[in-house]
Amino acid sequence: MTIRVLLADDQTTVRAGFRMLIDSTEDMHVVAEAADGARAVEMARATVPDVVLMDVRMPGMDGIEATRRITSDPALSTVHVLILTTFEHDEYIFGALRAGAGGFLLKDTDPDDLLDAIRVVASGEALLGRGLTRRVIKEFAAQPQQPEPGSKDLDVLSEREREVLLQIAIGLTNEEIATKLHLSPATAKTYVHRIMTKLHARDRVQLVIFAYDKGLVRPRSSERR
């Protein structure tokens, strides 16, 4: 299966470089380009790509708003957004993830890592660049306003599913969850997908956000800045 990619970046030379890299592979190719967020949304609706490689800072509509519009469009439910930017500021990371992005990388990521990231996000898995996952978890833990646990959203989960969600929220992989909770890897994976279905989450990143937003995970004082 060939992964269809939409490039959204306001710099022509950047898009040209990404196109050359992506089109040099056997399993993916660029189907369209956009120089701003509004055009990215338009081209996403026209081509329905597997992955949108989205810059954050673009003229007019930025990449965060474009991501929000793409991920909230039922007709684009199969489209995954991978944010790629030079800016490692928390507000961009959190804004992108809350908008529904499936991944976040910095533009100085190695080419091979970028291609692997596109493959991961295209498969429906969430991805954060090296060193960003722990930061995201710590920052969400430090948010001062958190709803109390026990809301009706959490009530849709069984006790075991809450245990699995807790492990996801602290950054464990399916294999690590299986070991921690004495499950088979296949059973752990089944639990993860069941939780995503019940919570209407697009990926694991949204599960982490949900767990902290609902107060399922409480930060230790050592985790605060």
Image (cartoon, grey):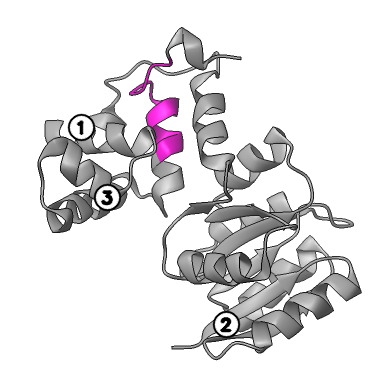
- Residue 93: % across, % down: 65, 41
- Is 45 drawn above or below residue 67 in the view shown? below
Is residue 213 in the magenta section? yes
Bounds of the magenta segment: 208-219
The amino acid type, in three-letter code, at marker 1 is: Glu
User: Quadrant where the N terminus lies?
Assistant: bottom left
The residue nearer to you, when weighing 184 against 42, is 184
Q: Earlier in the sequence, mark 3 or mark 2?
A: 2
- Residue 169: % across, % down: 37, 34
3 or 2: mark nearer the eye: 3
The residue nearer to you, when weighing 175 against 40, is 175
Q: Which residue is mark 3?
A: 174
Q: Which residue is mark 1?
A: 163
Label for residue 4? 2
Give me the residue at 15% from left, 58% from top.
186
Dot 2 alpha-carbon crowd within 10 angstroms: few under 14, some 14 to 19, many 20 or more: many
Q: Quadrant of residue 214?
A: top left
Q: Is residue 25 left or right of residue 90?
A: left
